Amino acid sequence: MNVKIKVNNINQKADSGETILSALKRIGINIPTLCNMEDLSPTGACRLCVVEDAITGELITSCSTPVRDKLEILTHSPKVIEARKTIVELLLTNHPENCLYCDKSGNCELQRLAEELNIREKTFYGDKPDYKTDRSSPGIVRDMSKCILCGRCVRICEEVLEISAIDLINRGKKTRIETVFQKGLYYSDCIHCGLCISACPTGAILEKSNLNELINRLGKEDKKKSIFVSSISIAYLAQRNNIRKYEDCRNYIVGALHDAGFDNVYTSAILNDYFTSEACNKIENNLKKDKTTIITDCPAVKKYLRNQDAELFEKLIDIPNPMQLTGDLFNKVIDFENDCMVSTVPCIAHKYEAIRSENTIKGVPKFEFVLTSNELDKMLHALGLSLPYTKKETPDKPSNSDSSSGVFFETKHGITEAIIRELSFRKGIVNKLNRIIEIKTDKDFIEYEFNLGKTKHTVACIYGVNNIKKYRSKILKSKYLFVELRSFEFGCIDGCGQTKTSEKEQQKKIRKIISDFDEKNNNNTAGKNPYIKGIYRLKQSEK
Ligand code: SF4
Ligand code: SF4
Ligand code: FES
């Protein structure tokens, strides 16, 4: 640290090039911010983070101003406090006052700032703009009357994803966030990943939910109801409720959902086992033709490729998505045309996937309700079924014999792990990813090397649609056995249908819960799942 600064009359040191905000954070001084977000470029748009230059009296934005030698600042002078208060008061001028009914209430940064700055009455009054709420996306609702124009959603979509589905349009009082042709998110390049929801400090962008409708239906005997619970939803609720073992949390959830009124409760890891087996069949075929197989089960990645990269989309292996795979496995226990089907997932993009034509029967989505992990949590609480105070039951057949790689499948490099294990198992080799040499660890592009019999193979995992763009020619020209594409570095663990408290800690905990389950499970590859074996035996006998 080579820069000498003075903060509130106390000498401090800072790194040259860092912002005043970052230096203050390290010193332990909390500065309120709104438009600033870690890993996004600072814009200085909201001016909430101002501090006072103790020499000139000027107010400077701490998030976008670098430290300089001999800088002297006051972080909480009367002038600074007054400025911050006025900024928030102005933001509240035309903000809707229906906080009680807003989904963001209790978790809203604007609400918290008003409380911290002790703003307890309205100072300014202004016209409320009459914006039409955008409900076109099946997973996201945009209510621009709650937007404070911080621009975080625009920057996350542009800088992290390089999608730019939304942007700031117009000037002055008419400024707002819009999609390119102002036709609604569904008609834009949006991949329904939900990152903008997690970036938005207010309730302007929220997850679309029909949870109340499902809860009302649960009390009624109208249709047989089946629910599929994803392994990440289980591990997410385990870490939220301090349940150490995956299998314990799974069984508490199954018991609770039976009590809630679901006739059948399944885990979706069996669908991952089926997907893995199908992928291995394709890889073995492609290997004979010396062809690289490109794989993803991520609906956001598929939407991106479908919209923006037809060449790569064409090269994706053609495996039915998990919702489609329910057909072969569950046709004896589910009446797909008449039963009510529900699934729980960590990611908002599945709400989009559920309405796509391949997942409909006679034009009606096969899954009537797609709940995020957060909604599952809310539903259990609303019904008084708090974990771990519920009875324990095992999942209904045929999802009572899921392999642990089907559970692991949704985590970081999970598909890669599941496939390598299964390919090895088919060759009579026991293999686990921790025995494979990671030959290049770039955060976004990871190559693994492993032996299948006497042959050495290399596979690759690419995280982030921006990186798929960046590495596309490498993917297309590569000689990998297969390439796994994912939206987020930690796989579905990073899904935006889960509240992130302390992101890194949470990722680690969820991954550990799943890894511990995997470590001690002997049923650890798709080919050991008796129901998957049964499917292939049946297919063989029908030939
Ligand atoms: S959901 Fe994702 S792709 Fe769509 S606007 Fe938000 S950040 Fe962009
Ligand atoms: S929608 Fe939310 S994140 Fe986007 S500019 Fe408005 S307040 Fe900020
Ligand atoms: S947080 Fe610094 S200007 Fe908005």
Image (spheres, helix red, strand yellow):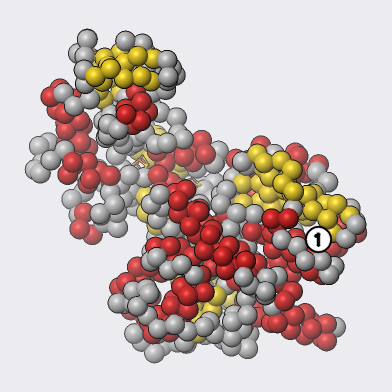
Of 256 and 44, the residue lying toward us: 256
User: Is 345 located above or below residue 219 in the figure?
Assistant: above
Q: Is residue 135 visible?
A: no
User: Is 418 located above or below residue 329 in the figure?
Assistant: above
Query: Dot 1 surroundings within 10 Å: few (below 14), some, or many (20 or more)?
Result: many
Residue 377 appears at what percent x and percent y?
Answer: 38, 68
Of 525 and 218, the residue lying toward us: 525
User: Total label count?
Assistant: 1
Residue 501 appears at what percent x and percent y?
Answer: 38, 52
Q: Quadrant of the C terminus?
A: bottom right
Of 364 and 102, the residue lying toward us: 102
**Quarter occupied by residue 289:** bottom right
Residue at (61% x, 67% y) in the render: 518
Residue at (62% x, 70% y) in the render: 520
What kind of element bears circle 1?
A: helix
Residue 273 appears at what percent x and percent y?
Answer: 67, 71
Residue 245 appears at what percent x and percent y?
Answer: 49, 70
User: Is 538 located above or below residue 326 in the figure?
Assistant: below
What residue does disc 1 label?
283
**Quarter occupied by residue 171:** top left
> Viewed as shown, does residue 207 lie left or right of 193?
left
Residue at (64% x, 59% y) in the render: 414
Q: Quadrant of the N terminus?
A: top left
> Viewed as shown, does residue 351 lie left or right of 385?
right
Q: Is residue 251 visible?
A: yes
Q: Is mark 1 within 8 Å of ligand 1?
A: no
Q: Amino acid at mark 1?
A: Ile
Residue at (63% x, 63% y) in the render: 409
